[in-house]
Image (tube, rainbow, N blue to C red):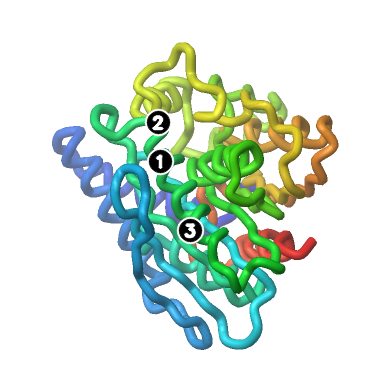
Amino acid sequence: MPVHEYFTAMFRGAAEAAAGGGTDEEREARVQRFMDDHRRIGDGWDTAGVAIADTAVPGPHGPVPVRTYRPEGGLAGAILWAHGGGFRHGDLDMPEGHIVAVELARRARALVVSVDYRLADGATVLYPVPIDDVHAAWTWLAAQGEFAALPLGLGGASAGAALAVSTALRARDAGPRPADALLLAYPFAHYPNPPLDWNLYPEMAEVPARFDPAGVEGMVRNYVGRISDVPADALPGAARLDGLPPTRIVVSEYDDLRSSAELLARQLAELGVPVASYLAPGMTHGHLNHPPRLPAIDESITFLAKGLNG
C-alpha cells in the first residue's frame, strides 16, 4: 500500500512549518515544534490497570533511571524495553517509550521496565556506555526472584533495538541470564546500512525524512566516535548471532532502515534462530512513536507482545 495518509499529512505539516524562511536553525526549530505537537496527541494515554513507578538501578557509569509498568493480575513474565532516537535522542516519555511500554504490559501481561539509557553525545558519552546502561538494567531485572520461573524478554525500537540485541549478546556470553525472547521494532543493526530493494525507491520518494548515507554516518560517529573499525556489538548485525533467543521483528514498509531489519532476520534464520517478522503496511520509520490508533501501529505492538510467550 502507499505511504499512509497519516504520515503524508504529517510530512505536509512539517514542510509548511519549514517554509517560513529564516536560518536553518530557525526552520529546524519550527519543524521540531510541529513534530512535538503532533506526537502530543498521545498525551494522557489511558494507563488504567497499569501501575507505573520511576526508580533507578545501579550501573557502571552511575545510576540508570528506569520506569516500571506493572499490569493488574498475575504476570506472564517481564520485558526490558529501550526506546529509539538514533542513540542521541529520546526519553521515557516519548510515545515509543511510554505508550509502547503501557501496551506491552497489558497485552503480554508482563512487567515492563523501560530504560533511560545515557544518550551518546559524540564526546563524553560514546559506545559502549548506552549498552552498559541497558545491560545494567537487564542485570537488575534478571535478579528479581519473582521472574525466576518466568520468561524475560529484551526489546527496543530502532537504535534501542540495536542496544537490545547487543545486550542479549552480552547476556548470552556473560549472563547473568540469557534472554528468552527478543522483541525488535525497525532495528538499526548494521553499518554501513544495507541498500534498499530498488523496487521501493519510487514510493520512498514520498518520504521526506530519510536516512541518507550522510545522516547514517553522522549517527554512527556520534555513537561510536568513528566510522572505521566499528565494534561488532555496537551495530550488532556484524556480531556472532548464534544462540540468540526466538526473535520478533517489526519492519516499517517505507523506511531506509528496512534493509537492516530484513538482513538481520535473514542472518538469524540462517543460524537457526527462530525469527518472525511483521511488515507494517504504509508505515514509515518510527511508527511506534505515534499512538496505536492506526491498525498497523496497533498490530505492531500486539505482534511484539505475543513474542514473550511464543
Judging from the image, what secondary structure is the residue with disc 1 in?
helix
* Amino acid, disc 3: Trp
Q: Nearer the viewer, residue 11 or 180?
A: 180
- First in residue order: circle 2 vs circle 3: 2
Which residue is the site of mark 2? 127
Q: Are marks 2 and 1 in contact (CB under 8 Å)?
A: yes
Q: Residue at x 72, y 41 (%)?
A: 244
Determine whether 66 is above or below 181 in the image: below
* Rendered location of residue 92, percent (x, y): 38, 60
* Rendered location of residue 188, percent (x, y): 55, 36
- First in residue order: circle 3 vs circle 1: 1
Q: Are marks 3 and 1 in contact (CB under 8 Å)?
A: no
Which residue is the site of mark 1? 130
Residue 140, which numbered label? 3
The answer for how far apart the CA atoms under marks 3 and 1 are is 16 Å
Total numbered labels: 3
Judging from the image, what secondary structure is the residue with disc 2 in?
loop
